[in-house]
Amino acid sequence: DGGITQSPKYLFRKEGQNVTLSCEQNLNHDAMYWYRQDPGQGLRLIYYSQIVNDFQKGDIAEGYSVSREKKESFPLTVTSAQKNPTAFYLCASSPGLGAYEQYFGPGTRLTVT
Amino acid sequence: KQEVTQIPAALSVPEGENLVLNCIFTDSAIYNLQWFRQDPGKGLTSLLLIQSSQREQTSGRLNASLDKSSGRSTLYIAASQPGDSATYLCAVRGGSGTASKLTFGTGTRLQVTL
């Protein structure tokens, strides 16, 4: 069953703690992306990766970090430097960075109190 | 900077109606445009992808058109059903300096009633 998985579905953390969100895909896609969704706003790009061991900042990278050690995996760490971390986080992938369709995972809702 | 606006923001219609959802973008130098559906608390499901060289795409009761020169895409939903109730998002890839990213609109929230 091909697709993108994100875990956990819900995550609760205390302010000041780092937290890592998981994203795995078995679609053999080269490109992977992390977006953040807030009520009333369009999805915003946090980081993207074109290939293993390479990643680029998106529009709102401050307070976030990523790694891409394996083609299938693109974990996102929300650090304590992120001022408003509570949001719905979506991972996506596509065959490449060109004019390809993007496929999305089910999302992780992070709540920081 | 590419900006995407979706009109209307919300729509409530009785079952059976044909619907028109609009997506307007400011920079016509796009690579493609993608329509998605999002159910509450869920991820995005891709509905249609239109490349910049195409004028329309169809999938079942859905038809999306693209007019790059006027910066507009329209999603037509024929014979709407309660199961169509969701938020519909459009996203464009490209625009000057943004070849690698999708820019999303804020969505049209659709409610189809019995």
Image (cartoon, coloured by chain):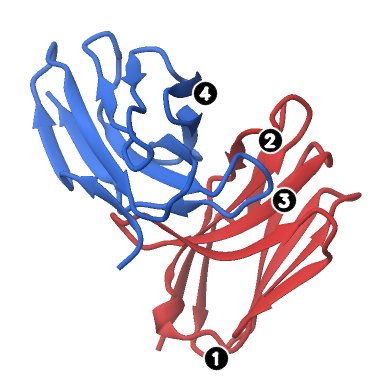
Binning the other alpha carbons within 10 Å of mark 2 as few (below 14), some (14 to 19) or many (20 upward) gives: some
Q: Nearer the viewer, mark 1 or mark 3?
A: 3
Q: For residue A42, which numbered disc appears in the image?
A: none
Colour seen for chain A: blue
- In three-dimensional space, the C-alpha distance between marks 3 and 2, rounded to whole angstroms, equals 14 Å
Q: Report the amino acid beneath label 3.
A: Asn
Residue at label 3?
Answer: B32
Question: Badge 1, how many Cα within 10 Å: few under 14, some, many 20+?
Answer: some
Q: Quadrant of the N terminus of chain B?
A: top right
Residue tagged by mark 4?
Answer: A58
Left or right: A52 as drawn, with respect to A24: right
- Amino acid marked by disc 2: Glu
Query: Do callouts 1 and 3 mark residues in contact (Cβ within 8 Å)?
Result: no
Question: In front: mark 1 or mark 2?
Answer: 2
Q: To which residue does mark 1 refer?
A: B16
CB within 8 Å, label 4 to label 3: no
- Asked whether the beta carbons under mark 3 and mark 2 sit within 8 Å of each other, the answer is no
The image quadrant of residue A64 is top left
Looking at the rendered structure, the kind of residue marked 1 is: Gly
- Where does label 2 land, which residue? B3
Spatial distance from mark 4 to mark 3, Cα to Cα?
A: 19 Å
Q: How many numbered badges does the structure rendering display?
A: 4
Q: Is residue B62 above or below residue B86?
A: below
Identify the element where label 2 is drawn: loop
Q: Quadrant of the C terminus of chain B?
A: bottom left
Vertical arrangement, residue B111 with respect to residue A85, above or below: below
Q: Amino acid at mark 4?
A: Gly
Q: Residues within 10 Å of mark 4 (few under 14, many from 20)?
A: some
